[in-house]
Image (cartoon, rainbow, N blue to C red):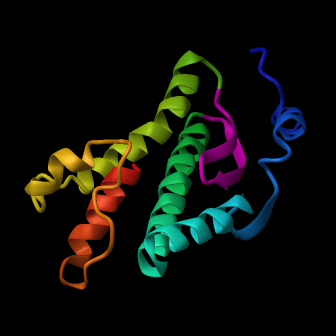
C-alpha cells in the first residue's frame, strides 16, 4: 500500500490550494474538524444581492449543506472501510475531505463514490416529479435555477426545487 500519510497529504494540498483553504472553524463533529472557506460568506452576499436576501441566504445555506453532506459521505465511507478522516473544508465550489481510505481497491472506490451517492440520495428525496411536475424540465437544466425567488405560498416546494438543483 503506497499511499501518502494523511498529514503529509494535507501539507502538500495546503501548499497547492492555500488560497482556497482560507477558512474559519466550525464546532467539531466528534473528532471531525470542520472549516468553512471565507468565500462562502462572499458568495452568500453575492447571492443576496442578485436574488434578494431570503432567496440568497436559502440558496447559500442549501449549497453549504449539500457540500457538507457530500464530504461527510466520504468521511463516513473512509472510516467504515478501516481508514481515517479528520477534517473537512467547505468551499462554494465544493469541499475537500481529508480522508485516508482503508486498504484495498474496494475501500478506495467506496470512499470515492460515497460523496456523489449522498448527493444522489438527496436528489431522490427532493425529486420534483411528485410535487412540482410542471417544474421538472426546468430543474434539470444545470445552467439555471428552477425559480427566481421564494414564494410564501409554496415555500416547501421552492426549497425542494432548489435542493434538487443544487445537488
Residue drawn at x 26%, y 43% is: 140
Is 121 situated left or right of 57 in this image?
A: left
Residue 48 sits above or below residue 7 on the image: below
Residue drawn at x 60%, y 53% is: 92
Is 90 situated left or right of 138 in this image?
A: right
Residue interval drawn in magenta: 82-102
Residue drawn at x 57%, y 47% is: 71
Q: Quadrant of the N terminus?
A: top right
Q: What is the x, y in percent for residue 11?
A: 89, 38
Whether residue 122 is visible here, answered yes or no, is no
Choose top left, top right, bottom left or bottom right for residue 14: top right
Q: Which residue is more in the foreground, 120 or 93? A: 93
Instruction: Residue lying at the far front in this picture: please name it.
Output: 50
Q: Which residue is more in the foreground, 84 or 36? A: 36
Choose top left, top right, bottom left or bottom right for residue 126: bottom left
Asked whether 21 falls inside the magenta stretch, the response is no
Q: What is the x, y in percent for residue 124?
A: 25, 48
Q: Which residue is more in the foreground, 145 or 9? A: 145
Amino acid at each position: 500500500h503506497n499511499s501518502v500519510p494523511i498529514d503529509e497529504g494535507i501539507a502538500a494540498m495546503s501548499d497547492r490550494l492555500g488560497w482556497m483553504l482560507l477558512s474559519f472553524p466550525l464546532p467539531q463533529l466528534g473528532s471531525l474538524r470542520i472549516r468553512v472557506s471565507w468565500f462562502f460568506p462572499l458568495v452568500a452576499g453575492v447571492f443576496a444581492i442578485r436574488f434578494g436576501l431570503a432567496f440568497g441566504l436559502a440558496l447559500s445555506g442549501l449549497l453549504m449543506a449539500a457540500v457538507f453532506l457530500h464530504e461527510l459521505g466520504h468521511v463516513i465511507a473512509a472510516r467504515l472501510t478501516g481508514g481515517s478522516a479528520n477534517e473537512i473544508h467547505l468551499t462554494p465550489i465544493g469541499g475537500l475531505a481529508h480522508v485516508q481510505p482503508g486498504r484495498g481497491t474496494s475501500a478506495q472506490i467506496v470512499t470515492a463514490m460515497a460523496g456523489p451517492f449522498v448527493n444522489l440520495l438527496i436528489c431522490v428525496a427532493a425529486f420534483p416529479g411528485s410535487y412540482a411536475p410542471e417544474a421538472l424540465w426546468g430543474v434539470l437544466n444545470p445552467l439555471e435555477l428552477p425559480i427566481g425567488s421564494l414564494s410564501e405560498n409554496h415555500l416547501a416546494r421552492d426549497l425542494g426545487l432548489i435542493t434538487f438543483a443544487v445537488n
